[in-house]
Image: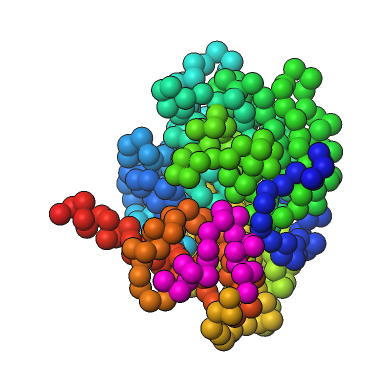
């Protein structure tokens, strides 16, 4: 393993399919007729409304407050009038309480209370509070509240900040374009977060299929910032936290522990760029870059989209679906979630919209396991997916726990390589969900 080809053990090399959008400049999508902002857009407690139906709101204005520490506020992504606070379709498949705003077509959509924030004179607690008030969550897909992640527990310290620009999911080029076009925001955010955490050095980690982004970032790193841009081998799931830490720092996060336990903090490049914008002009998390791509969409694009924009409006703006479109995913094809309703809105954690055609999403017949061990060679956390899959099929979930089921990050590598088309990762997800329900019932009793 050479210095320019750092990586982790195991993993897979799926076809990239990034050519449709890797060269497409980020384009601001026009504001839709209405935005639908679910109060649940992140892990933790949903936000609590601050506005009533009929209220006029302004782009960037807080419209819902955090409900506790593991929660973040919600802001209006467009200037307009609140027309409803009601249950609406959610990308999770549920009906979720949402604030609906009718966008004002005559408004210039300027930012509410635009001004720079002097981060250099804020304490660590004030910086973290500012990030929470900005509504920030991880933009890589997990949507974990950023201020919670950055709140270092007493007795712990951060030695290194890893900024994740790997974007190893096929089709997606959101982070690639952010690194090329918003390098200044990324580097400002890096400086702020590194100083806030007291880290001695930052590493921006980028796969080698994005050499233009590597060079663009290297050219702009300030001389007084202890930051290095690290090329990594193009491999899936390189961007997973534990894999990234292993590849860059050769440190292993112990089972059941977190990156902070090896003195590392990991954050997505989009999140870091957003923090740079927050302190540059007081812009909370009200919009995000989204890759709209795949063989099932007529005009693949990279768009800057107001949060809450309905999927239907985005697809229409990109020319609509092709005649053979079969499936629309939020996220990439490995870990993304199929959407059942074109009226669902994009959320803070929506990194991409992938439209697959018949040939990419065929119905597959499942065959018995042939014990080929391909899934063992692929699993990045060294589980035995074949045996776990057999236990899941028989409903022996407690035994799966003994085989470290909860270490599975549901990356889908095992399902991808399985010649028998066994839906391993789906079975693991169901098993984990049932075990969590059982555990909650046990605690309640």
In the rendered image, residue 317, in percent from the top left (x then y), is placed at 66, 64
Residue 210 appears left or right of 362: right
Front-lying residue, 426 or 316? 426
Above or below for 424 versus 173? below
Choose top left, top right, bottom left or bottom right for residue 198: top right
| Residue drawn at x 72%, y 21% as measured from the top left | 225
Front-lying residue, 73 or 34? 73
In the rendered image, residue 12, in percent from the top left (x then y), is placed at 69, 61
Front-lying residue, 55 or 312? 312
| Residue drawn at x 62%, y 58% as measured from the top left | 352
Front-lying residue, 75 or 179? 179
Choose top left, top right, bottom left or bottom right for residue 334: bottom right
Q: Main secondary structure of the magenta part?
A: helix
> Quarter of the image containing the C terminus?
bottom left
In the rendered image, residue 367, in percent from the top left (x then y), is placed at 56, 85
| Residue drawn at x 41%, y 39% as measured from the top left | 72
**Is 183 part of what is drawn in magenta?**
no
Above or below for 352 versus 74? below
Q: Which residues are magenta?
A: 372-392
Name, please, the residue furthest toward the top: 121
Whether residue 14 is visible here, answered yes or no, is yes
The number of numbered badges drawn on the structure is 0
**Is 382 part of what is drawn in magenta?**
yes
| Residue drawn at x 48%, y 45% as measured from the top left | 255
């Amino acid at each position: 393993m050479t210095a320019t080809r750092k990586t982790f053990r195991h993993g897979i090399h799926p076809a990239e399919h990034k050519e449709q959008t890797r060269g497409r400049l980020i384009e601001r999508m026009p504001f839709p007729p209405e935005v639908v902002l679910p109060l649940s857009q992140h892990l933790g407690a949903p936000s609590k409304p601050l506005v009533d139906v009929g209220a006029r709101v302004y782009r960037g204005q807080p419209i819902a407050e955090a409900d506790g520490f593991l929660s973040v506020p919600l802001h209006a992504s467009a200037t307009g009038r609140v027309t409803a606070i009601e249950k609406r379709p959610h990308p999770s498949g549920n009906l979720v309480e949402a604030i609906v705003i009718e966008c004002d077509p005559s408004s210039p959509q300027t930012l509410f209370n635009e001004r720079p924030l002097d981060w250099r004179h804020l304490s660590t607690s004030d910086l973290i509070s500012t990030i929470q008030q900005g509504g920030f969550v991880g933009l890589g897909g997990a949507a974990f509240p950023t201020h919670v992640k950055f709140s270092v527990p007493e007795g712990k310290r951060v030695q290194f900040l890893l900024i994740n620009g790997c974007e190893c999911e096929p089709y997606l080029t959101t982070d690639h374009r952010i690194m090329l076009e918003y390098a200044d925001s990324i580097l400002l955010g890096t400086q702020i977060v590194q100083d806030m955490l007291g880290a001695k050095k930052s590493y921006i980690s980028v796969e080698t299929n994005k050499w233009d982004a590597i060079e663009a970032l290297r050219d702009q790193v300030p001389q007084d910032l202890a930051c290095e841009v690290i090329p990594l081998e193009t491999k899936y799931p390189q961007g997973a936290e534990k894999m990234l830490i292993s590849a860059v720092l050769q440190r292993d996060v112990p089972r059941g522990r977190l990156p902070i336990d090896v003195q590392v903090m990991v954050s997505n490049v989009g999140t870091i760029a957003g923090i740079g914008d927050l302190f540059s002009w007081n812009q909370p998390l009200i919009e995000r870059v989204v890759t709209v791509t795949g063989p099932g969409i007529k005009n693949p694009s990279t768009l800057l989209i107001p949060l809450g924009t309905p999927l239907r409006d985005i697809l229409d703006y990109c020319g609509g679906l092709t005649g053979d479109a079969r499936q629309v995913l939020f996220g990439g094809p490995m870990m993304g979630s199929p959407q059942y309703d074109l009226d669902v809105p994009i959320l803070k954690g929506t990194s991409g919209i992938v439209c697959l055609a018949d040939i990419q999403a065929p119905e597959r017949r499942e065959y018995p396991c042939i014990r080929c061990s391909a899934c063992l060679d692929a699993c990045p956390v060294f589980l035995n997916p074949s045996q776990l899959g057999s236990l899941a099929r028989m409903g022996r979930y407690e035994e799966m726990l003994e085989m470290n089921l909860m270490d599975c990050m549901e990356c889908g590598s095992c399902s991808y390589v399985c010649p028998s088309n066994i839906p391993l990762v789906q079975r693991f997800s169901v098993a984990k969900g049932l075990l969590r329900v059982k555990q909650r019932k046990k605690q309640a009793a």
